[in-house]
Image: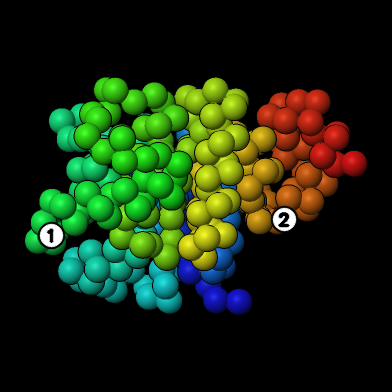
Amino acid sequence: MSTVVDIKGISLSIGGRDILKDINFEVYEGEIFTILGGSGSGKTTITKCIVGLYKPTSGSIKLFNRDISTLSQIELDNIRKDVGYVFQGAALFDSLRVWENVMFYHLEHNRIEERKLKSMAIRYLEMVGLAEEHLDLYPSELSGGMKKRVGIARAIATDPKLIIYDEPTSGLDPITSRLIDELILDLRNRTGSTAIVVSHDLVSAFSISDRILILREGEVLQIGSKGEILNSSLPFVREFLKKGLGDLYEARRA
């Protein structure tokens, strides 16, 4: 099984505070790997380390079998082309239309005529359940769920091998959240891409994940399949699941 991300013993201290403590895990090609934990547990910090925005105090990170700490800035930028990042709040540019948001990377780095860019944008929008009629809208004209979809379309517009989703269902109603879950699964199945999902939405995690990592205060408590996590013997994990899943906890364990 090919490894897309290989993290060995990373720790990160900022301002004398330990944010991450001896983190170890691998993410395999084609899987959906979810990092679960409460607010401030270090979930998003791990993903920022993976894409090279934070440099760990110690340990190593291999992305597509390359140690990112040894890469030049140009080499790091090149490897980032294979990583799509979906930000928690979608992070769309308010002054740009939908098609410009989706094709932002190509607008910045490639000389492609507008007609072709719009045609490409339609393709990616259709993959996330939107249509040509949305091309010229501005973010202010979109619902929360539509903004998330545009954010995902932008992330996949470079045909990445790895997509990182930061709290993809945050701020959405339950129905829209489940639609986003279905979209994440569909994109993985159609493109063969690997996904890392950062979340505190346990219902989402147990719907889409192949494996789950439980994080507490910058430390890994457990990594396993959904069944292994549901049947954890660790008191913190059991309590975390009970609070997050409610009545679904016992039903899913059955």
The image's mark for residue 190 is none
Q: Is residue 155 visible?
A: no
Residue that numbered label 1 is attached to: 112
Q: At which x and y percent is residue 113?
A: 11, 56
Identified by mark 1, the residue type is: Ile
| Residue drawn at x 18%, y 69% as measured from the top left | 74
Between disc 2 and disc 1, whose residue precedes? Answer: 1
**Nearer to us: label 2 or label 1:** 1
Neighbor class of circle 2 (other Cα within 10 Å; few <14, some 14-19, many 20+) is: some
Gap between marks 2 and 1 measured at Cα? 44 Å
Relative to 56, is 110 on the left or the right?
left
Of residues 85 and 220, which is closer to you in this image? 85
**Which quadrant holds residue 215?**
top right
Asked if 7 appears above or below 181 in the picture, the reply is below
Asked if 104 appears above or below 204 in the picture, the reply is below
**Which quadrant holds residue 138?**
top left
Q: At which x and y percent is residue 117?
A: 20, 53
Q: Is residue 204 visible?
A: yes
The image's mark for residue 225 is 2
**Which quadrant holds residue 27?**
bottom right
